[in-house]
Image: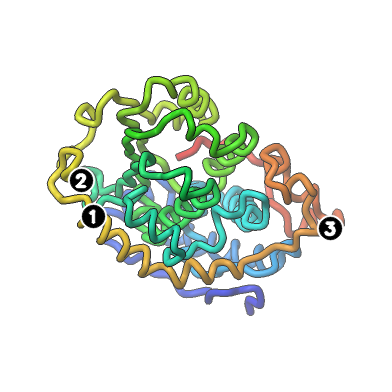
Amino acid sequence: MKYTKAISPADEYKFPYDEALQKLAEEELGETEDRRKHALEALREWAEKNPRIAKIRMDSVFLLKFLRVKKFSIPMAQENIERFILLRHTKDGELFTSLDCRMPKMARLLDLGYMFALPKRDKNNRRIMFYRPGVFDLNEFSNADMLRIHGICYETLLADEENQIRGIVHAGVGSGIGLQYLTLFTIKEAVRIAKNGEKLLPMRHCEMHGCNINPALKIAVDWGLSLLSDKLRKRTRLYTDIKDIEMDKSLLPKEYGGEMPMAEMIRLWKEEVEAYRATLLRDDQMAVHLHMYSEAAREGSVTALKQNLNACSTTKSTSSQYGLAGSFRKLEVD
């Protein structure tokens, strides 16, 4: 089949890792060679025939990250992909577009170590994203800058298939964060970002560790946690001090009890981000036909995005032939 909407080729996929990771993918995600081949073909045909989609990546690594996070449920991966592209055109689309690590503010945040992936994997061979929000100067950066740097870092991590399969660990220190940071987003914006981020980013969040959080922010932190699913809340741990964190402390920056100096970790992470830059910028070519969606969906409404996208289709035949096949059962975030 010729794919006219493809901005990247529909490649012939071969699993690039050892048998141990292949076994893990099968046990935790239900991924087998036959199931993977069938799912990739199904997604490509669906995308090509879906009238709402204008341009999309057809390469395996891109499509597989959605299949893996949805445990190879094709209908749910279809929904995730379409909403992911649609969100790039909504009010909160800064999270997914113009993700250029060379932009002055992005380069500055990377240099400051606002967030970076630790070089070594944990005991379960998972990458750890480390956060230092206290270096985010409200006089220098905006909320759009915060969204964009998260997009750059997350998309870079997800380009690695091993991270798609094993999932990500998050750890951060809240030193330097005060009440003024609550002005970055309105309540409505915060809700949309939290809900859309959890549901639409094709990332398996395995653990979340928060340390050194200002006691004055307890109410705000508790409210933020309430926006997450029950499963993610259970995977979240908060500590008075980073010395109490329940993970291998040797993996942390030397300044926080580890072995490698933070400056070296940041340098290595910047190399990873730079290596993925061209692909990430090419992703801006992905698009949908906005007129086929409701106004609320185009604005990034959480409620509208929960609704079946077929409700925005122009004809019944379009809905049934190219829509999100099957009924959607509740899927626990994984």
Tell me: residue 303, above or below residue 67.
above
Amino acid found under the numbered disc labelled 1: Met
Q: Earlier in the sequence, mark 1 or mark 3?
A: 1
From this view, report whether residue 224 is shown above or below residue 105: above
Q: Tell me the element at label 3.
A: helix
Residue type of the residue flagged with mark 3: Ser
Residue at position x 62%, y 39% from top? 189
Residue 78, can we see it?
Answer: no
Q: Given the image, on which type of amino acid does mark 2 rest?
A: Pro
Q: Residue tagged by mark 3?
A: 317
Residue 71 screen position, x and y as percent: 48, 47
Query: Which residue is rendered at x = 40% and y = 67% of the image?
Result: 276
C-beta proximity under 8 Å, tags 1 and 2:
yes
Is residue 182 or residue 203 the one in the foreground? 182
Q: Could you tell me how far apart the alpha carbons at marks 1 and 2 are, in whole angstroms?
A: 7 Å
- Residue 158 appears in the figure: yes
Identify residue for label 2.
253
Q: Give the left or right position of residue 299, taking residue 44 as reference.
A: right
Q: Is residue 106 above or below residue 251?
A: below
Q: Rounded to the nearest whole Å, what is the CA distance between mark 1 and mark 3?
A: 53 Å
Task: Name the residue nearer the viewer: 61 or 286.
Answer: 286
Q: Classify 10 Å Cα crowding around label 1: few (below 14), some (14-19), many (20 and above).
A: some
- Residue on which the image places disc 1: 265
Q: Which mark is residue 294?
A: none
Disc 3 vs disc 2: which is toward the camera? 2
Q: Neighbour class for label 2 at 10 Å: few (<14), some, many (≥20)? A: many
Residue 77, percent from left and from top:
57, 52
Could you tell me which secondary element the residue under label 2 belongs to? Answer: loop
Q: Position of residue 89 (x, y in %)?
A: 67, 57
